[in-house]
């Protein structure tokens, strides 16, 4: 069954970005992100895509934009999350879907997702203008924690009502 998960990296206060850039670009986290999303579908907002600057290789890239003329090469552009998910369903069970940002897209999809993969840094960023939404513990339970380094931990959350195949 195709799963929809949010994946993000946060500071101590759940900050995720500043001026359309990540707060942290640590090799351990970037390597894990690549390992998890490789061969899968990634959905992002236009600003997130533009901050990356190009489609992520070896993944199906879907960019949400309300601009009907927006058509960067190498990505599928959807005008809504519903349209993006409809496109993803064409791949059936072959690929999972990862929401990779930005903040408003996380907020829109968090309580509709099947899980969350959250890298937490012990650091507190000095400048933050975008935050990850709070995780509702009535919907999600912490499944496991993985330490990439003593300062970087990854938390895996799943829905309480998640059905297994």
Image: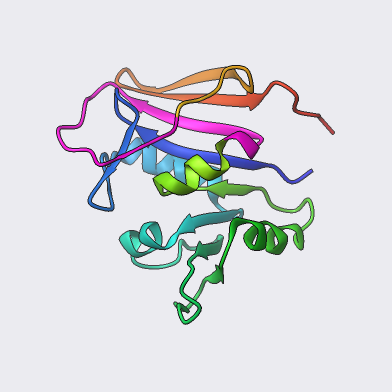
Write down the quadrant of residue 112 in the picture. Answer: top right
Query: In percent of the image, x 41 and y 43: which residue is there?
Result: 31
Query: In percent of the image, x 43 and y 38: which residue is there?
Result: 8
Q: Position of residue 76 (x, y in %)?
A: 56, 71
Task: Classify 74 as above or below 157.
Answer: below
Q: Is residue 113 visible?
A: no
Q: Nearer the viewer, residue 1 or 77?
A: 77
The answer to whether residue 52 is magenta is no
Q: Position of residue 144 (x, y in %)?
A: 56, 18
Write down the quadrant of residue 122 in the picture. Answer: top left
Quadrant showing the N terminus: top right
Q: Position of residue 119 (x, y in %)?
A: 41, 30
Give the residues in magenta.
111-133
Residue at the left extreme? Answer: 126
Query: In percent of the image, x 25 and y 42: which residue is there?
Result: 129
Q: Is residue 128 visible?
A: yes
Query: In percent of the image, x 75 and y 53: which residue is there?
Result: 94
How many callouts does the rendering have? Answer: 0
Q: Nearer the viewer, residue 124 or 137?
A: 137
């Amino acid at each position: 069954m195709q799963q929809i998960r949010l994946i993000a990296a946060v500071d101590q206060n759940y900050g995720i970005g500043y001026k359309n850039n990540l707060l942290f670009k640590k090799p351990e986290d970037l390597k894990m992100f690549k390992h998890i999303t490789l061969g899968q579908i990634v959905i992002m907002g236009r600003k997130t895509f533009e901050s990356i600057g190009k489609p992520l290789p070896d993944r199906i890239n879907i960019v949400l934009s309300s601009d009907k003329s927006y058509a960067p090469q190498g990505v599928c552009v959807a005008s809504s999350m519903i349209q993006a998910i409809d496109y993803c369903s064409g791949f059936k069970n072959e690929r999972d879907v990862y929401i990779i940002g930005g903040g408003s897209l996380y907020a829109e999809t968090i309580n509709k997702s099947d899980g969350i993969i959250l890298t937490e840094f012990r650091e507190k960023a000095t400048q933050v203008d975008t935050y990850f939404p709070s995780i509702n513990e009535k919907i999600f339970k912490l499944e496991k924690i993985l330490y990439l380094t003593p300062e970087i931990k990854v938390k895996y959350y799943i829905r309480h009502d998640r059905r297994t195949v």
